[in-house]
Image (cartoon, helix red, strand yellow):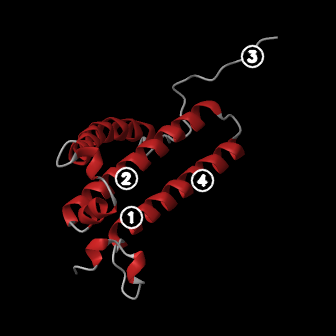
Amino acid sequence: MSATIADPRTSHATTRRGMNLEKWGWVYMRVSGVLLIILIFGHLFVNLMVGEGIHGIDFAFVAGKFATPFWQWWDVIMLWLALIHGANGMRTIVNDYVTGPRVRAVLLWALGLSAAFLILLGTLVVFTFDPCPAGSPADLLPAFCAEL
């Protein structure tokens, strides 16, 4: 009794006509990986080396960063790239190891929905963050809110 193993180059996401999704997924992983290295090391440098270093990271530090559109976009781009990069890697693993078409479809849908939900939630947190909400009790707000 012999078992046949599928050709590793066989893809579940390609069609004879049209775009090769596996190729573009591979290209995305390389490009996003390089961009993520730049974004992450920039993030770490600003948070850990500039100013008071790790001792300066508190609620006021985060609120100050999120008050600047540059850092909002920096963090959102880093979030988007990291989540899509991770979801694409998980998609590759599912395509490589899950043999049942229904199970594969369910896992890929769950992966896509969870990545989309986390991207949406993270983006909302970054762009709607308000450290000094109006009408909040003064004793619950950070000290810098009293100065505003």
Residue 79's tag is 2
Sequence-first tag of 2 and 1: 2
Q: Quadrant of residue 41?
A: top left
Q: Residue at x 61, y 53 (%)?
A: 110
Q: Which residue corresponds to mark 1?
A: 123
Badge 3 local density, few (<14 within 10 Å), some, or many (20+)? few
Q: Residue at x 63, y 47 (%)?
A: 107
The single residue placed furthest to the bottom in the displayed view is: 135
Residue 109's tag is 4
In screen coordinates, is 43 left or right of 10? Answer: left
In screen coordinates, is 14 left or right of 48? Answer: right
Badge 1 local density, few (<14 within 10 Å), some, or many (20+)? some
Badge 4 local density, few (<14 within 10 Å), some, or many (20+)? few
Query: How far apart in space, not on screen, are marks 4 and 1 (Cα)?
Result: 21 Å
Sequence-first tag of 3 and 1: 3
Q: Vertical placement of 6 versus 21: above or below?
A: above
Identify which amino acid the numbered label 1 is placed on.
Answer: Thr
Q: Which residue corresponds to mark 3?
A: 3
Circle 4/circle 1 CB separation < 8 Å: no
Identify which amino acid the numbered label 4 is placed on.
Answer: Trp
Sequence-first tag of 2 and 3: 3
Sequence-first tag of 4 and 1: 4
Residue 52 in the image: x percent, y percent? 21, 48
